[in-house]
Image (cartoon, rainbow, N blue to C red):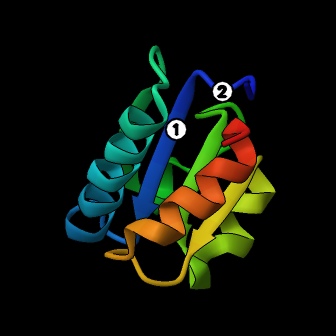
Amino acid sequence: MADINKIMCFCGCGLGTSLIMEMNTQTTLKEFGVDGVEVVHSTIDDVIPGAADLFVCANDMLHIAEKAGRAIGIKNMLDMEEYKEKLGEIFGR
């Protein structure tokens, strides 16, 4: 398993998009049987090195997240298969 203790899902304002990504990330981790990982949602202003072990965002913000640490970009925030694919690569699923 990846050394991930905290995942931050973020968007520009830290409201709708990031909340949906947080819920979908939590659902995916639950399906994988991954426990003990804190998943939060926030605004782009909170994306700084050390704020999380993994950042999840829309593809168009990935370049910002990668400056802060490990990150994945989501093309379609409602596509659960995309979460499974991208988080699966990190969590070995």
20 versus 69 height, above or below: below
Q: Nearer the viewer, residue 9 or 47?
A: 9
Sort mark 2 into few (<14), some (14-19) or many (20+) by Cα contacts within 10 Å.
some
Looking at the rendered structure, the number of numbered marks drawn on it comes to 2
Tell me which residue sits at (27%, 50%) in the image. Answer: 23
Residue corresponding to mark 1: 7
x then y, percent, for residue 14: 30, 60
Position of 26 with respect to 74 (left or right) is left
Q: How many residues crowd around disc 1 within 10 Å: few (fewer than 14), some, or many (20 or more)?
A: many
Q: Does 86 sit left or right of 49 as displayed?
A: left
State the image coordinates of residue 63 (x, y, percent, origin top left): 74, 74
Residue closest to the eye, 54 or 1 = 1
Asked if marks 2 and 1 touch (Cβ < 8 Å), the reply is yes
Using the image, determine if residue 1 lies above or below residue 66: above
In 3D space, how far apart are the residues under numbered discs 2 and 1 (Cα atoms)?
7 Å
Relative to 79, does residue 51 appear above or below in the rendering? Answer: above
Decide if residue 66 is on the left or right side of residue 58: right
Q: Quick one: quadrant of the N terminus?
A: top right
The residue drawn where x is 49% and y is 25% is 34
80 left or right, relative to 7: left
Label 2 element class: loop
* Residue at the disc numbered 2: 4
Q: Residue at x 66, y 42 (%)?
A: 93
Camera-nearest residue between 81 and 5: 81
Where residue 50 sits in the image (x, y, percent)? 69, 31
